[in-house]
Image: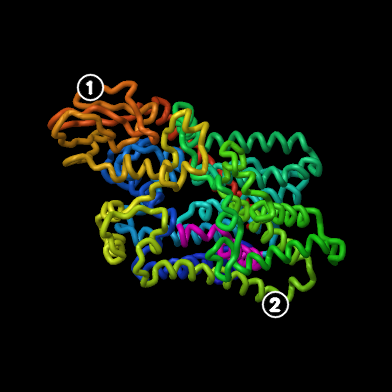
Amino acid sequence: MRRRFAQYRQTGAYRDSQAVLGFVVIALLFALPILNQNRMVLGVDAFFHLHRFYDAAMQLKTGQFNYFVSLFGFNQSGRIVNAVYGPWFAYLNGLLLLLAGSWVRWQFWSNFIIAFGGLLAGYLALRWAHVRRLYSVAGSMIMVGSLPGLSWFANQAFMSVGAMFIALAVGIGIRMLQQPNRPINPWQMGAVMALGIQVHMLSTLFMLLVLVWFALPAVFRAKRPVLMVLNGLLAAGLALLLTVNVWMPFLHVNMGNRLLRPFIELRGDIPADTLGFTWDGSHNLSLIAMALIVIAVAVLVLRNQCRPRLDFTTQWTLLGGVLLVVAGSQLLPWRMIMKDADNWLSTFQFALRFGIPGLILIVFGLLLWLQQQPIAASSGMQVATLATGVLAMGMLFTPMTDKMATQSDLKTVVGLTAYTRPKLTVKQLVADERRTDLSRLMLDGTQNYPDYLPISKKTATSLTDKDWYTKNGLDQAYLRDIVLNRLPKMKQTVVDGQLHLTWQAKRATTVTLPVVKYAETTLSLNGRMLNNVKLSRIGAPIVKQQAGRNTLIMGYQTPGWLPTTQYVAAISWGLLAFGAVVAQLRRFYKEKE
C-alpha cells in the first residue's frame, strides 16, 4: 500500500489533487465571512437573481412547474426570465436554496461553489495551455481575485460567473496555436461552449470572440486546416445539441415577442462604464490588475529585446488582451458608440465588460512569457507569483465585508436600483435573510429591471436613454404597473401550473393587472377568455373589471416540443460524461502499464 501511494505521489494526478484541495480551502475561507457575520451581501443585481432562484426553488418544492413564466418570483407576475437566462442553472440554484434552508446559507454555499469553480476552471485552462502547475495555481487566483468578474461576490453581477468559462475558452484558444497537428478537440470545445450557454449567454459571446481571435492565425498554421474547420463545425454542432433546452425556448420567446433588452448605457456615461481601478478592485480593477496590464504592454513593446525571444503564441495572447482592455477603456469614443440602441456593440451592455476577457488573456500571456525566462525556475519567483495570487484573493474581502458591515443606510446595503418595501430597516432585512421562510426576503425587495418584458414595435424602434432610469422610464412603468400595483383584497395562488389572481372591486371600471402578457400567455377573466387585450408599455393587461369578486387565470401555451429538448440535452450530457469517464480510465490504465 505504501509503495503504491509512493508511486502515486510521483504522478501528475497527485500534484493536481493537491491544487484542487488547496482551492477547496481557499473557497471556504473566502465564503466564511458570510457565516461569521451571519448576513448576506446584497449588491446592485442581487434581488434580480434572488427572485430567479426563488421562483425555481418554489416550483421544485410545490411541483407547480412552468418552464417559461414566473409563478412565484418577480411578484408572481408571470414574467419570463429564467427561460431566456440559464434555466437549468436557475433550477440548480433553486435546489441549493431548498437544501440550504435559508438565504444566508444559500449565499455561503453558492459563493463557495462559484469561487471554487472559478479557481478550478482557471487552473485547468492554464494547464491546457501548458503552464506549469505552480504558476497555474497562482494564475487562477489572480484571475478570480483581480477581475471585474469579482462583481458576483460584491454585487451579484453575473459576469463573474461567466468569467470561469471565458478562461476555459482562452485555454482552448491557446492550444490551437500550440498544437498545429490537432488544433481543435471538438468534444472539449463543444462541451465548454455548451457550459457557457447553459449558464450565461453574454459570457458565451466573449468566449466566441476569444476563440475567433485564436482561430484566425491557427487555421493558417495548422497542418491540416480543412480538418481544423471540420472539427470546429463538429464542436459547434455538439454545443447546439447540449444546449437545445436553452436556445430553442429562447428562439420561441423571441420570435413571438419583442423583448426589451437589458439596460444599455446609451448616455455614454464614461466614468461609470469604462474600466477604472482601486486598490481592492471595488471599482472594476485592482492595482494588481493594472500592474499586469502595464507589464503586458511593456513586454509587447520590448518583445524584440526579450531573451529568449517572445514566441508568436505569447505575443498573440498578450496582444488580444491589451486590445480588449483598450476596448473597455475611455480610449474609445463610447459616448458616440452607445448613442444608437441598435448598434451591435450595445449587446455587450457596458464597455468595461471587455476588460474581463482582456485581463484573462493578459494573465495567460504573462505566465507563458514568465515560464520561458531563466528566473522562472527560481524559488523566489515562484513564491512571489503565488503571493500575488494570494493577495489578489485577499483583496476580494474588502468590498464584500464593507457591505456586511454595520451599515444603517438601506440604499447603501441593497444598491440604488433596488426597490424595498416601505419602512423596511436593515435589522428586518438581515432577520429575513436568516429565516427558513424564504418568501419573506422576496417581499422585502425587488429589482425594477424591465429586462425581457414584451414591448411594442413602436417602443422597440424608438428606444433612447430616457427609457431607462428616468422619471418616465420603462423601469418606472414596471414599478408602477407590477410591483406597486395592488388591487383591493388581492390574492395570488398557483394551481396546475397557472397563476390565479383574485380581487374585489366596488364598481365596474378599467384597471391594469399586475401581470405580464406575452404572445403565448393565456388570460381568462371571470370565466371569459381575453383576446386582443390592450397592454401597457411593459405588457401589463388593461381590462374592465366587474363589481364584486374578480378572478383572473393566467396560463402559458407551452409548446409540445419542450419536453423533447430537455430529454435530448440531458441524454447528450449523460453520454458525453460517460465518454469522458471511459477516456480517463483508458488513459489511467495506459499510464499504469
Residue labelled with disc 1: 528
Which stretch did the figure color magenta? 133-155
> Where does residue 364 sit, x and y in percent of width and height?
68, 59
Q: Taking 258 as reference, is 314 above or below it? A: below
Relative to the observer, which residue lies in front, 490 or 584?
490
* Residue 356 shows in this picture: yes
Q: Is residue 301 left or right of residue 500?
A: right
Q: Taking 284 as reference, is 339 above or below it? A: above
> Where does residue 482 sit, x and y in percent of width and height?
32, 41
Relative to the observer, which residue lies in front, 6 or 474?
474
Relative to the observer, which residue lies in front, 17 or 105?
105
Q: Is residue 107 left or right of residue 311?
A: left
Q: Residue at x 44, y 70 (%)?
A: 402
* Residue 8 shows in this picture: no
Please tell me the numbered disc located at residue 464.
Answer: none
Please tell me the numbered disc located at residue 379.
Answer: 2
Helix, strand or loop at label 2? It is helix
**Is most of the magenta stretch helix, strand or loop?**
helix
Is residue 586 highlighted in magenta? no
Q: Quadrant of residue 87?
A: top left
Extreme residue toward the front, this view: 471
Q: Residue at x 79, y 42 (%)?
A: 222
Q: Residue at x 42, y 33 (%)?
A: 454
Label 1, residues with CA under 10 Å away: few <14, some 14-19, many ≥20: few
Relative to the observer, which residue lies in front, 97 or 575?
97
Q: Amino acid at mark 1?
A: Arg
> Where does residue 348 sit, x and y in percent of width and height?
58, 45
Helix, strand or loop at label 1? It is strand
Q: Amino acid at mark 2?
A: Ser
Q: Residue at x 68, y 65 (%)?
A: 292
> Where does residue 250 sit, x and y in percent of width and height?
48, 34
Extreme residue toward the right, this view: 304
